[in-house]
Image (spheres, rainbow, N blue to C red):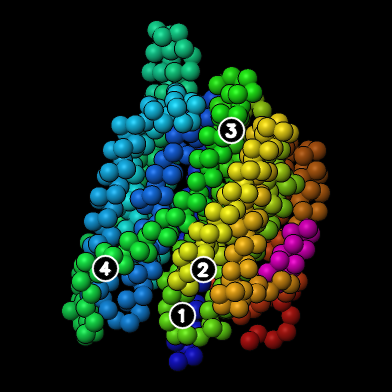
């Protein structure tokens, strides 16, 4: 029994690592293709691109983002007790919901794109990008159900593979689409006397990649599903459970599960939409030109957000892998195991988030210069330095949100996110109206938002299951290791910059930073030998650490 539990724990970490690695790969691809995309589209065009995406994101909240989590939760709960027939019914009900909700919202966004862009977002030229994105809502809804079904079965590989392939297609088609439509937009600009048509059409071309990537990922996931369907149907035939749930009941359960997740996800992620709307309208009221605030928002979305989202993808992936495992553990009633799972995923998360925040703080400008060739990297670099701490808060809040949902507490995350959102909006308006911090107000209000969620979620977990996060190995040791990393990295960057140039110095400094942090973490006891053994290639990691004398004592 103990061996079986150990295997389950190891599989949980391996599956989480697979999805986390895929998340990092997709974000790295995203960061790489944003370089030529930003160069083609320009800051103004990226502003239109961001406005379209902020609206698109809200639409996804209402139709798609909740589906992987909800389907995963409901499927894993039934598979845990051997009810494969009921699990398959959940999948079919979710598909029906995706078709109806995704199709309806896609149509609404497409038809009302002009009204939304002009009257709500105060950026009428974003309408072209928004119309291209509208059909993608239906595609992503269907894709979300398939991914949730795979995750509910305990396999993160199909999601990981489809995510990577989706991003590769997205990267290629975004750059090609932006390049081709930029030329078309410039021709229209000459005839209509409005130079914004070039950036606007280029932004629309950039969104072609999003819909192309999502459609390709849907095809790949469908192929994997049909290949796996034979195996799952054999499990259905061997299903001896007497409990049978009707489609009517399952549809109701699905909606009751999706509704709070939608509310939670919408409240948690709608901040981007509100930020853009508030920022644009206040900047316009303060006398700034459309091109000026579009350019600032373009820097925020294409440079700042691209980098910050890399560590956040790890948090999202770990959170997704935690849900099925946590649901199964909760059903055993073993509070100690529940605490261990929360502790493990939170620690692993902070081991990545804290050094990333430190890296952004000390190397913001060199990283921006390495990745983006724009006129004003100084503004984007300052954003990254100011917002670096939000990486830690957002990663932590993402995990705690998923933990509360996995504990079947769907309302608390909604309440906490709503309170935090209210504080966030008030702080943003005050910073923009009174202090006139323009785009920096958006960055700082994000820190307020994510920090408030962390505090409220920590209190809720303590009230719900008596869980209090261990401090020393979760926060203190990673902070000390990150401080050591920061000192070494700054010295290395300064030395290599003298004779190798800034770009090469930055690359070498980043490599040294990873090695220094990893060595410091092991040396300080931030990660144990047993924990490394449960990671992918754990034996190899332990062997390497022993050769470097980072681990002392006999092998256990």
Mark 2 or mark 3: which comes first in sequence? 3
In this view, the mark in front (4 or 1):
4
- Which residue in the structure is indicated by mark 3? 279
- Which residue in the structure is indicated by mark 2? 404
In this rendered view, identify the residue nearer to me: 485 or 233.
233
Asked if the residue under mark 3 is in contact with the one under mark 4, i.e. CB atoms within 8 Å, the reply is: no
Residue at left 56%, top 35%?
278
In this rendered view, identify the residue nearer to me: 476 or 262.
262
Most extreme residue toward the bottom, as rendered?
1
Left or right side of 237 for 528: right
Q: Mark 4 Cα within 10 Å, few/some/many (few <14, many 20+)?
A: many
Residue 55 against residue 539 in the figure, above or below: above
- Which residue in the structure is indicated by mark 1? 329
Residue 81 at least partly seen: yes
Q: Quadrant of the N terminus?
A: bottom left
The image's mark for residue 197 is none
- Which residue in the structure is indicated by mark 4? 250
In this view, the mark in front (3 or 1):
3
Residue at left 40%, top 7%?
191
Residues in magenta?
A: 473-484
Mark 2 or mark 1: which comes first in sequence? 1
């Amino acid at each position: 029994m103990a061996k079986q539990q150990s295997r389950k724990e190891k599989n949980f970490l391996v599956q989480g690592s697979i999805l986390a690695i895929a998340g990092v790969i997709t974000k790295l691809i995203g960061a790489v293709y944003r370089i030529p995309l930003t160069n083609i589209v320009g800051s103004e065009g990226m502003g239109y691109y961001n406005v379209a995406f902020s609206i698109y994101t809200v639409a996804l909240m209402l139709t798609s983002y909740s589906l992987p989590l909800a389907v995963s939760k409901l499927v894993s709960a039934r598979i845990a007790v051997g009810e494969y027939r009921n699990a398959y019914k959940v999948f079919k009900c979710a598909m029906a919901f995706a078709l109806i909700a995704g199709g309806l919202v896609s149509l609404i966004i497409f038809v009302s794109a002009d009204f939304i862009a002009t009257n709500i977002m105060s950026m009428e030229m974003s309408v072209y990008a928004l119309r291209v994105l509208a059909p993608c809502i239906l595609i992503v809804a269907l894709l979300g159900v398939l991914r949730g079904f795979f995750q509910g079965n305990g396999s993160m590989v199909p999601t990981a593979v489809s995510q990577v392939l989706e991003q590769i297609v997205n990267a290629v088609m975004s750059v090609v689409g932006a390049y081709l439509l930029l030329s078309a937009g410039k021709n229209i600009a000459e005839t209509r006397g409005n130079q914004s048509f070039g950036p606007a059409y280029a932004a629309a071309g950039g969104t072609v990649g999003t819909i192309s990537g999502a459609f390709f990922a849907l095809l790949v996931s469908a192929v994997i599903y049909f290949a796996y369907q034979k195996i799952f149907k054999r499990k259905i035939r061997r299903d001896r459970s007497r409990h049978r749930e009707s489609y009517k009941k399952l549809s109701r359960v699905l909606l009751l599960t999706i509704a709070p997740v939608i509310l939670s996800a919408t409240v948690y992620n709608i901040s981007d939409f509100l930020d853009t709307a508030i920022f644009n309208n206040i900047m316009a009221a303060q006398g700034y030109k459309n091109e000026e605030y579009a350019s600032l928002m373009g820097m925020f979305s294409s440079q700042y957000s691209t980098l910050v989202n890399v560590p956040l993808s790890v948090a999202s992936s770990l959170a997704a892998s935690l849900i099925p495992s946590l649901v199964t553990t909760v059903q055993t009633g073993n509070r100690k195991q529940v605490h261990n799972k929360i502790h493990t995923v939170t620690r692993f998360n902070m081991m990545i988030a804290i050094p990333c925040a430190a890296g952004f703080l000390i190397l913001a400008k060199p990283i921006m210069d390495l990745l983006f060739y724009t006129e004003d990297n100084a503004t984007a670099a300052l954003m990254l330095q100011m917002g670096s701490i939000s990486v830690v808060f957002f990663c932590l809040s993402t995990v705690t949100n998923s933990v509360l949902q996995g504990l079947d507490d769907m309302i608390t995350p909604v309440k906490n996110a709503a309170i935090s959102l209210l504080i966030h909006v008030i702080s943003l308006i005050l910073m923009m109206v009174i202090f006139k911090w323009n785009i920096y107000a958006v960055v700082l209000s994000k820190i307020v938002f994510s920090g408030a969620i962390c505090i409220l979620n920590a209190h809720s977990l303590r009230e719900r299951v008596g869980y209090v996060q261990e401090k020393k190995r979760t926060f203190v040791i990673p902070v000390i290791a990150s401080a050591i990393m920061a000192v070494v990295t700054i010295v290395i960057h300064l030395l290599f910059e003298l004779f190798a140039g800034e770009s090469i110095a930055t690359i070498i400094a980043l490599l040294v930073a990873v090695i220094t942090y990893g060595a410091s973490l092991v040396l300080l006891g931030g990660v144990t030998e047993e924990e490394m053994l449960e990671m992918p290639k754990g034996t190899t990691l332990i062997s390497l650490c022993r050769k470097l004398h980072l681990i002392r004592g006999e092998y256990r």
